[in-house]
Each structure stands twice: as structure tokens, then as C-alpha cells.
Amino acid sequence: MSSTVHQPAQAGDFSSSSIRLDGQVAIVTGAGRGLGRSHAMELARRGAKVVVNDLGVARDGTAGTSSAAEEVVQEIRALGGEAMANAASVTDAVQVQRMVDDTMARWGRVDILVNNAGFLRDKTFSKMSLDDFEAIVDVHLMGAVRCTKAVWEIMKAQNHGRVVMTTSSSGLFGNFGQANYSAAKMGLVGFMQTLAMEGAKYDIRVNCLAPSAATRMTDALFSQEELDLLTPASVTPGLVYLVSPGAPTKTILCAGAGAFACSNVTMTEGIFAGDGPTSSELIALNAEALAARQGEIVPATGFDQSKRELLKARAARQQAPALAA
């Protein structure tokens, strides 16, 4: 099976600075290292004022005293950009609100929120404590909820906003030893799907980024050759696209090693089995048709599932008298 490499059409006709973010203010959580640092640096390069948020914790979320956020701010300033450091924990709603208040006091707006903060506590579910499960859900899912809630009314009042949730292939497709992380990351997809609809009338576009990158959280998973390809910088172009003036909304963008793709939650055409005494057996007998992907759709809203089910039920009722005759 061959793989096709699609190069951007007429790539030479486009400046690397075609997407500008001048005058916009961005908050990037977990921006002291890795992906967050890469995102913050590039947003600043394209003209945004950046809040570099990082609590400085270790890979497993234990306390740290890192000055990484301030170091990124100094890098941005050295390149002529504007930035300020912030050490709020996304697990603390009061600290998050203070971060947003300080941003508004300094720059008067918030245009972009990149929910990137997080850590790992990987174990099989059998060995995982409930505390470790809750900690991961709290930082990845609820951390994004707290930050988004703090900027949501500001973005509505501006009639402009871009919010990116950092999801993961672990959430989309599963990954051994990451039940807590997978649950949190797929939760972010559901959060995004609804916020994209609620924010549409205010030009608030909400998307998910599913990165593959060599960071503290992945450095033990890949060979050195693979790590050299999976740089944070190879993901950040996707982030810029998702916060740009022409950004999509309700999109799950997979990104890694300079390759980009969209992931979708789909629904197959399925079957009608009714609710009779042998309906369960009919489902089992038609398992292949149930899962067949020909004609599958990407539902626009959650109601699309009910609509399709009702259509099948009504069609079956109309056919029943004809079959009886």
C-alpha cells in the first residue's frame, strides 16, 4: 500500500507571514516547554501579544520551581515581540480568572486561547488509583473548561475568538496504559463540538489539535530518528491555521512531523431491528451491515442520530402493512 505525499500548491507564492495576528492577544497554557513554547513563539512571531502560562510542574504533575515561562517571554522579547509570564494553575479557577483579569488589564482583550497544559500518570487501569485518574481529568479536561469559561464572555463581547483544545490520538483511538488521559482527551472533543456551535454567532471558532511531537510526555515512546522528525515546530503550523482569521470550526486536526489530517466522529448507515423479542438477535446477525462504512456521515449535531433512527423506524412502519398485504 503506497502513501501519497501532497505538497502545497504553489507553495513558493506564499510568504511564511501571510497569516498575521497583529493586535491580537493569545493565552497559551503549558507554554514553558515543548508544544506550548513552540506555539507561543510562533504566535508572537506573527504579531500576537502572548501570555506564556506555565506552572513549572514535573512530567507527572508534581510541584516544580521552573522559570520556563519567564525564559520563553525573554526569548519572545529578544525577537521584538510582546509577552508576559504567568504561573497560574489551570486546576485552580481563582488563579485562572486572575490570569485573564491581568491580561485584560494589560492588553484589553483576549482573542486566542490555546489549552495545552497537562501532564501524564500512565498505568494500566488495574493499577491506576482513582486519584491519578481524577488528576489527569482535572488538568486536561477541567483545566481547559476553566480557562475557556474565563475568556468566553470576553470573546462573545468582542464578536471574535479562537479556542483550541489539545486532544490526542490516545483519546480518539485509545492507547494502552492511558485510560485516564484517553478519557480526558476525548472529553475535550465533545466539549469542542458543542462550543463550536454555541460560539458560531459570535465568530468564536473552536477546534481540537491532536499532536504527535517529541516532548517530555513522549520522549520514551519513539526512536531518536522518529523524535528528530516529530518536533513541536512540525505541529505548530496546524495550531496557527486553527487560530487564523480564516480558521475552520468544529475541526479535529491531527498533526505531526509536518503532516496534517482531519479526524471525524462518524455514524454508519446502520440497520433497523425494531424492539421485538428477537431484536437483539437481529442486531447480532447483521453485525457486518451495522458496521459497514459505506454511506457513513459526520453528524452536524447530536440530534442527527435521533433523526436517522426515526427515519428508519418510520420507513419500517410504512413497509410493514405492504408486507402483510
Image (cartoon, rainbow, N blue to C red):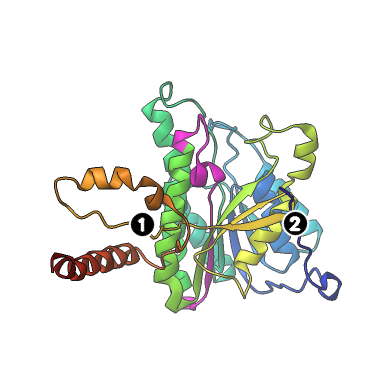
| Range shown magenta | 157-180
Disc 2 designates what residue? 4
Circle 1 packing at 10 Å, graded few (<14), some (14-19), many (20+), is many
Alpha-carbon span between mark 1 and mark 2: 31 Å
Disc 1 designates what residue? 270
Q: Is residue 308 left or right of residue 237?
A: left
Q: Considering the numbered disc 1 on the image, is that residue within a helix, a strand or a loop? A: loop
Amino acid type at circle 2 is Thr
Residue 175, magenta (yes or no): yes
**Is 127 situated above or below 313?**
above
Circle 2 packing at 10 Å, graded few (<14), some (14-19), many (20+), is few
Quadrant location, the C terminus: bottom left
Residue 251 horizontal/vertical position (percent): 53, 63
Q: Considering the numbered disc 2 on the image, is that residue within a helix, a strand or a loop? A: loop
Q: Which residue sits at x=48%, y=78%?
A: 159
Q: Nearer the viewer, mark 1 or mark 2?
A: 1
Q: Is residue 306 left or right of residue 296?
A: left
**Of 199 and 126, which appears nearest the observer?**
126
First reached walking from the N terminus: tag 1 or tag 2: 2
Extreme residue in the top direction: 127
